[in-house]
Image (cartoon, rainbow, N blue to C red):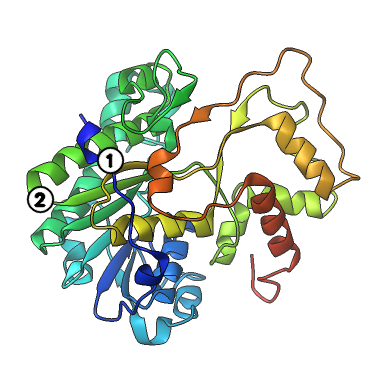
Amino acid sequence: MFKGILSTCPKSIDERNMNHSNKTVCVVGASGLLGSNVLKEALARGYKVNGTLRDVNAPGKATFLNALPNAEANLRLFEAEMADKASFDDAFSNVDCVFIACLIPVYKGPTGKPAREMDDEQGYAEIIMPTVNGCLNIMNAAAKQRVKNVVICSSTSSTNPIPPVPIKNEIDHWSDENEQCRAKKYTSATKTVMEKAAIQFAAENGQRLSIILPTGMYGPVILPGHMKGNPHSWLKKLIDGEEPPHQKIPNDSTSMSHLHDLASLFLAAYENPKASGRYYGVYESWHWQDIYAELQKIFPRMKMPEPITEPAVEPTGFDFSRRDSLGVQMRDIPTMIRETVEWIKSEPFKSDSI
């Protein structure tokens, strides 16, 4: 289905960093963990930036976004809600690209019933479709304003084929949303269904669509509230001398991303006119025992979780040829962890309430 959309090499870094002051982009989910970093990167490159939030007056959000470099002259914030496509009209006016950096996940039905207690039919209708329809509403609003470039944040959870493969890629490998639903993994299934719907919509409406696929996000955050979530919260606990989040090392692997690298991938996917389709936004996957070994170098007095006693599973393998075609210089995992720890140690929000 996607074999014809492999990207060629992007423009050079010098060309990418040229003055973009004649273009306006919009970041949907501007106060989110990733969205705020995409917004910051776009401002740094000279773009005029519109950002959407559900509530521009929410405490601890607009203040920090408006304090970013270049924000005073080039940032405008708008209220918009993904369930209401008309709410995006003003934010998308005269915009060249829409970055959908955050789609609010649904964990409970309208009656408050948790997703884990739902059957497949109810989970699909009440958990998956609100987010999918929200994405399509945003893309529809962009099409109405003749926006031809869209970049969406999804997840690597949409690229887990059955049976698993040693090395997976974004073109050939998809998760089975029906299997995800049967396993009660409705949030993961949402990503799979949303991507397929977005690809179809973009093809039918002449939009150039790129989809970035991250997982755990590390690195500096823009809003103090983001410090409450993983992985920043448990790294902060390690800095404070508390125990790690696991009593026993999980016999599993995980993949990670630095927020600055992710933001660069978003901008690169937009700035390269030949880029489209899905792109991994992660580094190589590491087993948790290797992650803890790296953490112990930083925190030599850390109480280590119990070691695994069974053979270690093989980490997930990725083909990064498409990701690397975007020309972003990616960090490695040790650098990412150390940079995140040092940034947290600097107490960036010391004078602010977290």
Q: Quick one: SS at disc 2?
A: loop
Q: Secondary structure at mark 1?
A: loop
Q: Quadrant of residue 213?
A: top left
Query: Which residue lies under the disc numbered 1?
Result: 6
Instruction: Find the residue positioned furthest to the bottom.
Output: 73
Q: What amino acid type is highlighted by mark number 1?
A: Leu
- Residue on which disc 2 sits: 206
Where residue 53 sits: x, y (%)?
35, 64
Q: Disc 2 or 1, which lies upstream in sequence?
A: 1
Q: Is residue 71 above or below residue 119?
A: below
Image coordinates of residue 136 in percent, x first then y, are 19, 46
Residue at the spot x=37%, y=23% of the render? 118
Residue at the limit of the structure toward the right, as seen here: 301
Give the quadrant of residue 120: top left
The alpha-carbon separation of the residues under discs 2 and 1 comes to 18 Å
- Which part of the image, by quadrant, shows the C terminus? bottom right
